[in-house]
Image: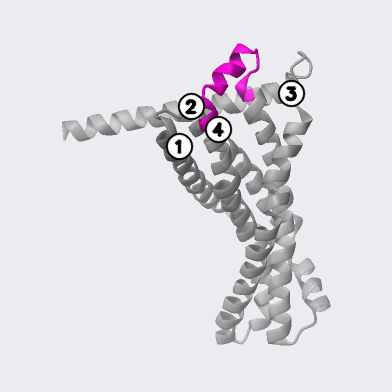
Amino acid sequence: MLTFLEGLGRRTVRGIEELGYHAALFAESIYWLVWGKRIGQPVRNNHVVKEMVSVGINALPIITVLSFSIGIMLAIQGIHTLKTFGAQNQVVLGIALSVTREFAPLIVAILVAGRSGSAFAARIGTMKISQELDALKVMGINPVRYLLAPALLAMLVMVPTVTFFADLVGLLGGGLYSAAELGIGLDVYWERTLDVLDPEDLMQGLVKSVLFAVMISLISAANGFSVSGGAEGVGRATTRAVVMSIAAILVTDMLFTYFMNQ
């Protein structure tokens, strides 16, 4: 029993230390983004644009496929379930709220965590193992300013933008299936969608995407900066970054949804 409590205490302390490290990375990144230019050490725009392309533009094809599929899936399940009550025409409400509030931000965040987050953690970890981070410090370049700040800004811009794109594609997928299954026109579908959607529904998903962007950036960077043990350590850190990011996304989504719907 004593051994168990001792192990639990150590893990708790490590968890608190890790949260503090994430908070410190976030604060330092915001400092460089806000004050870097004023002290002659700005975050380079070309680095930000490069990260934006990697996070958002390159992910559009797979985001399109996944969002379109989710929209169709919601339409199939919604129509099948509502037929029991003779209310299949109400499927538009279910699709609109589910896509904008939940599925679009979740799909985008999980894909970004698995794709860009893992690559970011691996890149930082490889740079640490090869002592490139030490070389940056010797040259007077802060690793957080050079690596994390551009990635964080790119995530904050592109994850909500891509989420909005996923909203449109998901709603289109649900509309096409509903039109074919229920015989309603797409114009009628979009009109009903706009009637049932409030700006708050759209903003709920976009605010979530901002939180997810911050978590993915910080978790990936923290795991990359903490790499040890050579190439094997880079692999462990990359896997841990993805698992932690997805777990944080799902838990945060659950808590956010709970409090927003009270």
Question: Between marks 4 and 2, how big is the CA–CA gap?
Answer: 14 Å
Residue 149: percent from left, percent from top: 66, 29
Q: Earlier in the sequence, mark 3 or mark 1?
A: 3
Residue 12: percent from left, percent from top: 35, 31
Check the image and report above or below for 175 versus 251: below
Q: Amino acid at mark 4?
A: Ala
**Dot 2: within a 10 Å radius of its alpha carbon, few (fewer than 14), some, or many (20 or more) residues?**
some
Kindly state the secondary structure of the residue where label 3 is placed.
helix
Q: Amino acid at mark 1?
A: Ala
Q: Earlier in the sequence, mark 3 or mark 4?
A: 3
> Can you identify the residue that label 3 sits on?
34
**Dot 1: within a 10 Å radius of its alpha carbon, few (fewer than 14), some, or many (20 or more) residues?**
many
Q: Earlier in the sequence, mark 1 or mark 4?
A: 4
Q: Earlier in the sequence, mark 4 or mark 2?
A: 2
Residue 91: in sight, yes or no?
yes
User: Which disc number belongs to residue 129?
Assistant: 2
Q: Amino acid at mark 2?
A: Ile
> Can you identify the residue that label 4 sits on?
221
Q: How many marks?
A: 4
Left or right, 103 with reference to 176: left
Question: Residue visible at 71% across and 68% down?
Answer: 171
Question: Between marks 3 and 4, how big is the CA–CA gap?
Answer: 19 Å
Q: Give, as a single range, the part of the protein colored magenta.
A: 124-144
> Can you identify the residue that label 1 sits on?
237
| Cβ–Cβ under 8 Å for marks 2 and 1 | no
